[in-house]
Image (spheres, helix red, strand yellow):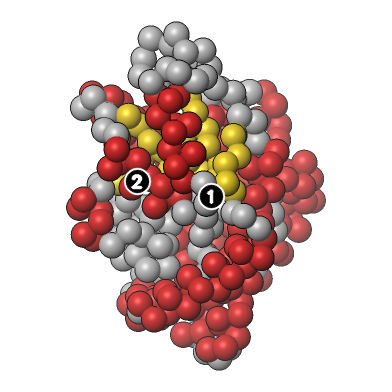
């Protein structure tokens, strides 16, 4: 979806996306110091309570100063769908506008952004029993095995879904097992429609200055998370009898690797290497998605003043 005409009757919406460790949250806070905004988190891990350090969630004092909608809205045992995110995000956008604030969507979960800007197809309702069965199978055989199973029944979906993306693999298989028809067939018959169709939107992608810079930043940030108590944070989750590693919350990068360490699957050094590698792979997938997704305007993550000027001019109607 490209930026729509300036004469849209309603106030605009600004979205800031970018790979892991690109400075999205810092940019949002800088804008909040200069503009009347409502920050709306677009992050599939920050939604969970008790998952603070590993999600790079802003500290409580910062959240008090810069409130974020859609943070701490779920327990890690809960399922949270892309459709629910869209509904929650649209409610947050409406609340921001009712308060006279600019809706500022900020995060790195690209499937959430895709759903907002490119839309969702109408699909069958989720089936908790099938979802739990698939999670149990994944816990035993691994998500790549379920991805191979998906490739047999829906090769088109399997081609675009990464073999380590549990939520999308699970949802595609859930649709097939529940209806006997592939996710691809459902999507073809129910073309997506963006909930933001007709809105005046600016989509800004923060771009790290280099891949090497991202690699260093990822390693430094994970080490800082360990220093801040990430292992103890995951241990509290690990000790809960209602949680298991097949849950979407605990498949998150960083949490998954620390959980394996606590389960005795490998030592500390291997855990660190696995987590950093997985985070770098996530950042690469985020960059790849942003390169191909329509409507995003790449900006140097270091050029904060220029990006702020772009956004402020857009909001003022000086740039479309």
Q: Residue at x 35, y 40 (%)?
A: 31
Q: Position of residue 223 (x, y in %)?
A: 47, 78
| Residue 145 shows in this picture | yes
**For this rendering, which residue is in front, 72 or 26?**
26
Q: Which residue is drawn at 42% across and 62% down?
A: 55
- Mark linked to residue 18: none
Q: In this view, does 129 lie to the left or right of 229?
A: right
**For this rendering, which residue is in front, 11 or 158?**
11
Contact, CB < 8 Å: mark 2 with mark 1?
A: no
Query: In the picture, residue 273 is in which quadrant?
Result: bottom right
Please tell me whether residue 68 is drawn above or below residue 10 in the rendered image: below
Q: Residues within 10 Å of mark 2 (few under 14, many from 20)?
A: some
Q: Which residue is drawn at 25% across and 53% down?
A: 63
Q: Position of residue 7 (x, y in %)?
A: 44, 8
Q: What element carries label 2?
A: helix
The residue carrying mark 2 is: 30
| Residue 81 shows in this picture | no
Point out the image quarter for the N terminus: top right
**For this rendering, which residue is in front, 176 or 315?**
315
Picture mark count: 2
Q: Which residue is drawn at 35% across and 79% down?
A: 229
Q: Is mark 1 on a helix, strand or loop?
A: loop
Please tell me whether residue 134 is drawn above or below residue 91 in the rendered image: below
Q: Where is residue 27 in the image (x, y as percent from the top left)?
A: 41, 47
Q: In this view, does 87 lie to the left or right of 133?
A: left
The residue carrying mark 1 is: 301
Q: How far apart are marks 2 and 1 (CA)?
A: 13 Å
Q: Position of residue 215 (x, y in %)?
A: 62, 67
Earlier-in-chain disc, 2 versus 1? 2
């Amino acid at each position: 979806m490209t930026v729509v005409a300036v004469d849209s009757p309603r106030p605009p919406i600004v979205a800031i996306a970018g790979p892991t460790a690109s400075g999205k949250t810092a940019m949002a806070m800088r804008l909040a110091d200069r503009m009347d905004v409502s920050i709306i988190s677009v992050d599939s891990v920050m939604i969970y309570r008790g998952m603070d350090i590993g999600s790079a969630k802003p500290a409580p004092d910062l959240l008090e100063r810069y409130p974020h909608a859609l943070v701490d809205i779920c327990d890690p045992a809960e399922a949270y769908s892309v459709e629910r995110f869209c509904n929650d995000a649209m409610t947050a956008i409406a609340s921001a506008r009712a308060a006279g604030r600019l809706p500022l969507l900020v995060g790195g979960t690209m499937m959430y952004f895709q759903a907002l800007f490119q839309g969702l197809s109408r699909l069958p309702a989720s089936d908790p029993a099938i979802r739990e069965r698939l999670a149990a199978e994944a816990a035993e055989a691994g998500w790549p095995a379920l991805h191979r199973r998906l490739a047999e029944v829906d090769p088109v979906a399997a081609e675009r879904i990464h073999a380590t993306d549990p939520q999308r693999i699970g949802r595609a298989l859930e649709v097939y097992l529940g209806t006997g028809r592939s996710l691809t067939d459902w999507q073809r018959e129910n073309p997506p429609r963006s909930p933001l169709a007709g809105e005046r939107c600016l989509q800004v992608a923060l771009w790290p200055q280099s891949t090497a810079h991202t690699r260093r930043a990822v390693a430094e940030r994970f080490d800082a998370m360990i220093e801040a108590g990430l292992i103890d944070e995951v241990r509290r989750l690990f000790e809960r009898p209602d949680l298991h590693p097949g849950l979407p919350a605990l498949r998150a990068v960083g949490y998954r690797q620390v959980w394996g360490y606590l389960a005795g699957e490998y030592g500390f050094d291997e855990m660190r290497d696995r987590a950093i590698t997985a985070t770098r792979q996530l950042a690469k997938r985020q960059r790849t998605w942003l390169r191909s997704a329509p409507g995003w305007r790449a900006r140097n993550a270091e050029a904060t003043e220029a990006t702020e000027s772009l956004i402020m001019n857009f909001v003022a109607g000086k740039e479309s």
